[in-house]
Image (cartoon, grey):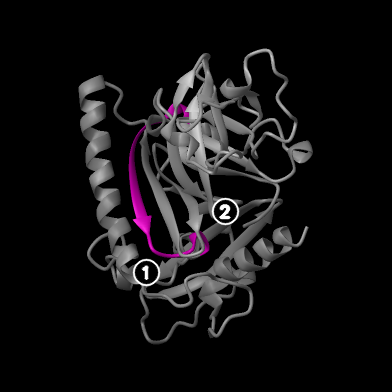
Amino acid sequence: MIYNQWYVILDSNELSRKPLRVKRLNENLALWRDEHGTVCCIDDRCCHRGVSLSCGQIINGKLECPFHGFIYDKTGKVTLIPANGKNKTVPETMKVKAYKTYEGYGLIWIWWGDDAKATDEPFFFKELGDFSYSTFIDPWSVHYSRAIENQLDVVHLPFVHRTTIGRGDKTLVNGPVVIRDKELITFYVNNVKDDGKTTPLKPDEIADYEKLFHLQFHYPNIWQNFISDKIRAFAAFVPVDDENSLVYIRYYQRMIKIPLLRELFNYIGKVSSIVILRQDKRVVITQLPKKSAVKMDERLIMGDKPIIEYRKHRQELMGQ
């Protein structure tokens, strides 16, 4: 995983007023909301006898271990050991790792890295705040980097999605043009039919590329597809462990605003997103190895430029 990054790990609706156990970034985590509704996240293993803390209950905004009643606050520190009495000072060593959290746009992030380097809030495509949306969550048996690369792949469309978004037999790939701006990658797509005579244009040969259909990815794990000015697709590729991830797909739109019609339209958009995503999943889960890297036993082509840039940039960030 890339260190010192905010990772989307949950949809806000997944965390109610009860503790929740999840596996993210190869760690078992316990999450809950304190008395103010703020998201708290600590390692899901009691420092006393190793029991799962998420099996406990919330007491005055803190998490109680279900085994011996130890009370944990949001910093991971034990504030009370019942067997020692309320007046007994708790040793500083009685603690577990805690994670900074951020909640916004219906998503929950955790900071994976040094707390001192944490920014106030994670990056998000803030223009989506004006859209309504529907959400679908899908488990994939691949490393999250493979799931990300699938959404950077402009070559697969007429084959994997020949019955949906890949209709038209546009197999010839011009470019694509890839622009990196800090931790944001924007790539511009121009796929056309192959007439048997045309040679694909190199990225620097494409004029007015800004007018082309484009997509964006921001490290470490969010992506959006500019379907139109009023319709977007969004995804968060959530790391579970080295061989599993969760894909959080959202269908965003601002065409329909009348409540009942809006919900119906969003539902139809979600169903369409599921169909397309499952076409991807059927193929991607067969890829080996399950985790990508800069140097692999693959023979890449010009159309793979977004994937090549992603791998290089990811490696750079991991080396910081």
Q: Amino acid at mark 2?
A: Glu
| Residue found 45% across the figure and 27% down from its top | 130
Label 1 vs 2, first from the N-terminus: 2
Q: Position of residue 48 (x, y in %)?
A: 59, 38
Check the picture and name the quadrant holding the N terminus: bottom right
Q: Amino acid at mark 1?
A: Ile
Q: Position of residue 239 (x, y in %)?
A: 50, 54
The image shows residue 170, relative to residue 17, as above or below, that is below
**SS at badge 1:** loop
The image shows residue 35, relative to residue 112, as above or below, that is above
How far apart are labels 1 and 2 at the CA level?
33 Å
Q: Position of residue 235 (x, y in %)?
A: 44, 48
Check the picture and name the quadrant holding the C terminus: bottom right
Label 2, on which residue?
210
Label 1, on which residue?
285
Q: How many marks?
A: 2
Q: Position of residue 238 (x, y in %)?
A: 48, 50
Asked whether disc 1 touches disc 2, contact meaning CB atoms under 8 Å apart, the reply is: no
* Relative depth, front residue between 275 and 200: 275
Q: Is residue 136 magenta?
A: yes
| Residue found 58% across the figure and 81% down from its top | 296
Residue 34 makes an appearance in the image: yes
* Relative depth, front residue between 71 and 228: 71
Residue 213 makes an appearance in the image: no
Please give the range of residues in magenta.
129-145
